[in-house]
Amino acid sequence: MPSSLIDTLRQIVGATHVLADGDLSAWEQDWRRRARGKALAVVRPASTAEVAAVVKACAAHGTALVPQGGNTGLAVGSIPDASGTQVVLSLTRMNAVRNVDADNLTMTVEAGCILQNLQDTAEKAGLLFPLSLAAEGSCTIGGNLATNAGGTQVVRYGNTRDLCLGLEVVTPQGEVWSGLKGLRKDNTGYDLRDLFIGSEGTLGIITATTMKLYPRPAASLTAWAAVPSMAHAVQLLALAHGHLGASLTGFEVMGRFALSLVNKHMPQLRVPFIDQDEVPYGVLLENSDSESEEHARARFEALLETAFNAGCVVDAVVAENLAQAHQLWHIRENIPLAQAEEGLNIKHDISVPISRIPAFVEHADALLQREIPGVRLVNFGHLGDGNLHYNVQAPAEGDAKAFLRDQEERVNHLVYEAVAAFGGSFSAEHGVGALKVDKLQQYQSPVALAMMRSIKGALDPQGLMNPQCLLPVAADRSAA
Amino acid sequence: MPSSLIDTLRQIVGATHVLADGDLSAWEQDWRRRARGKALAVVRPASTAEVAAVVKACAAHGTALVPQGGNTGLAVGSIPDASGTQVVLSLTRMNAVRNVDADNLTMTVEAGCILQNLQDTAEKAGLLFPLSLAAEGSCTIGGNLATNAGGTQVVRYGNTRDLCLGLEVVTPQGEVWSGLKGLRKDNTGYDLRDLFIGSEGTLGIITATTMKLYPRPAASLTAWAAVPSMAHAVQLLALAHGHLGASLTGFEVMGRFALSLVNKHMPQLRVPFIDQDEVPYGVLLENSDSESEEHARARFEALLETAFNAGCVVDAVVAENLAQAHQLWHIRENIPLAQAEEGLNIKHDISVPISRIPAFVEHADALLQREIPGVRLVNFGHLGDGNLHYNVQAPAEGDAKAFLRDQEERVNHLVYEAVAAFGGSFSAEHGVGALKVDKLQQYQSPVALAMMRSIKGALDPQGLMNPQCLLPVAADRSAA
């Protein structure tokens, strides 16, 4: 049966676009090298019709499909399981920009388009596509949609979900739903678009999308503020919302230890205020102005003056030019790399209501330091969205590998229990994938899980779409 | 059985809150008096637990439920059918503000809260809840969510969907899903929130919600521009986006005939530029500034100067004070009343991609005037969202009642076919209700409809939730 399926797939997409031999590690291994699967084949269709035919063929053979974009996800959501029975459906050949409609402030692109290409396409049209995240040079918009990716502009523009006006989807039955009208108001039935967004390939294959575009700001300025506590950072956020309104396009917080790692491993980046011992947090603010750089600077200065007087900023610098702004952002972006330089660590992508973040951090810091002496906390993230990357670095002395092996489960348990106690989420912007399916069962409401399972069963009754992710079908399925 | 159900309902909510006799027209008749149903009873629970118990009791009896908020919908979506077998579940007693969290920019309110109370609650906290529409003094947030209501601030803040961070829902099985965490990022499974939003009470009962709040602008200014064509109005919109960015909070277009009706029936409102024959459209713009009124005025003047020079505005006035601004908005808001004064008319709530609106209007105007001589077109709406209320007034001479009786179906057909040809939607912000179920079958994609029916069947297998709306169960059901 598999070989006849592979023959069929070759007929659909052409023999060169069905990979069944040789080194398939680019498709079988996840980005963080946490897991490695084995594919029956990698299929690379070039059109929606080919995707539909592939899905139909796999459905007829009862073969599971794993859709894959740039394979940059952090939750092991786009690789096959170890059974060697699953087909990886790679969307990267579907990378056309179908249409840019400047007057409608939309563009329609195929799922395999690299995120950076969307940004560039918008820029060429004199417009802005604001989704921005670390993997933008290699992740695809289809993957961004499937995981409802977040990033650094969410405080102003929302998550990927909020930027999407419509989808084209191939259903688990191989039918094509075309929902690419590009309308800002359309109340004609259930919101299928948002159901597919964030469903991580478990309900169907996103093949194209119509995304919102925005006017480009006349100027964007970046500031770095030294703040005396997380509570002051939250206070600064409220002041920034009030002073800048929708011009506040970035608000990132970085803990002192996270910054010290950048300072240690990348001293050339010159972390501001790192020598001031009384500064436990730095905040990166971005102000995007529709008028002029001069106006943006005046507004930024008014904000920072108010913040000084309120005592929630002890020192601050506004980038003088684009190079300085990039340098400040570079520090923020290099925290994960500096962490890796320092050694093994345990990552969390959590969210908590913004108002509760100071209490959460105080509680979690104390808890971890009490329970695991010597542990080091690399806390940074998108405070404007209540989203922290609350990462735990092995103690400076001792065997980091052993620490991870012995403590990872316990650290996760402590952190996720604290997050739950503060009304938060164990996965803010990275999704569930195959990595966190047990956490989903543990922390998602049973009533919600029951509804999700009903929906999965209704739309994908064969259970063939990315079956090991989100809500896995019975674990022994792939061995059947 | 019904009397034993009513006894049970009385035990749950108290006898005074089960209405089964007397004049129930406030709950049985729709807002526009297009339809009148007959309820088995009207039940008015005071808590989520009571709603859950009511739903369970009705499910056990196989009795259908029609959730109702302010009953101000325009698509006959919140009244019972004529069978006398359905229970109306009125949420208006559930009107508590549970929580305002200023630092998280959220508030949690019960479904029966009047929209205006949400606006007032936000204002008291020094914040803004931007949803604003004609019925705000009597519609409820639960109804706004169930229909994904739009209104006049969508160009900046989006539809009700975009303002919602979470829901509490009673499922058709009478279980409570609590999704009120108030997180801006939470990727832990399918997006149930957006599935319930816009589902018009057919998947469960929304009992509470956590909504986003925004900083209040320092100043809001209103301008009225006379534009020489719909294409110029679209050009003005692009200029306004570029100049004002997210400060553009309103962009309404009004056709000359619509304005002439206001001028005729409410001459005291003094419609600007109504004597200038060469002005086919007026545009109302709102500019909400985070800095100051002075700054808002300077930005508005820069925009209008650019627009004059580009030829897309022939005359304009910026309101000098709040009273003048209200007066300009008053003209816009009174178009429906002026229409009613003029006589019977056929209403449409359509959307088309903004870029195609000029061609659509030219096509539809010519088509209708050719097919139905003497017809008068009252065209106005939210151009910033591509949403027009493209209404058709009976010819000035002749019998308007006969016109409606003889022509309504034909007019609808002509308009909706034109909308479909231009890639638009037959229901932009009013929903489907019971009024437009045939249009949904006709114009929604069959693949989408099949998925919607699967979801309805999965979540409400008994088919008891608002069964005559959106995707009706077999028409003979209520007679069974």
Image (cartoon, coloured by chain):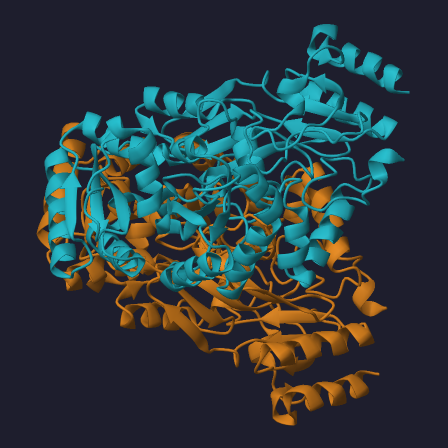
Chain colours: A orange, B cyan
Q: Residue at x 70, y 61 (%)?
A: A468
Relative to residue A239, is residue A152 drawn left or right?
Answer: right
Residue at the far front in the pictured view: B398
Q: Residue at x 81, y 23 (%)?
A: B57
Q: For this rendering, which residue is in front, B182 or A436?
A: B182
**Residue A40 at least partly seen:** yes
Q: Can you give x and y, in whole percent of width and height, for residue B423 in the image?
A: 50, 63
Q: For this rendering, which residue is in front, A169 or A424?
A: A169
Number of marks in picture: 0
**Residue A133 at least partly seen:** no
Q: Can you give x and y, in whole percent of width and height, for residue B211 in the image?
A: 46, 33
Question: Which quadrant is home to the C terminus of chain A?
Answer: bottom right
Relative to residue A7, is residue B132 drawn left or right?
Answer: left
Q: Can you give x and y, in whole percent of width and height, for residue B58 in the image?
A: 81, 26
Residue A56 sits in quarter: bottom right
Residue B82 sits in quarter: top right
Residue B15 sits in quarter: top right
Q: Is residue B443 above or below residue A2?
A: above
Q: Residue at x 70, y 30 (%)?
A: B66
Q: For this rendering, which residue is in front, B196 or B418?
A: B418
Question: Which quadrant is home to the N terminus of chain A?
Answer: bottom right
Q: Is residue A2 above or below residue B46?
A: below
Relative to residue B70, is residue B89 drawn left or right?
Answer: right
Q: Is residue A364 above or below residue A215?
A: above
Residue at the far bottom in the pictured view: A15
Q: Is residue A278 above or below residue A180?
A: above
Q: Can you give x and y, in whole percent of width and height, for residue A459 in the image?
A: 73, 57
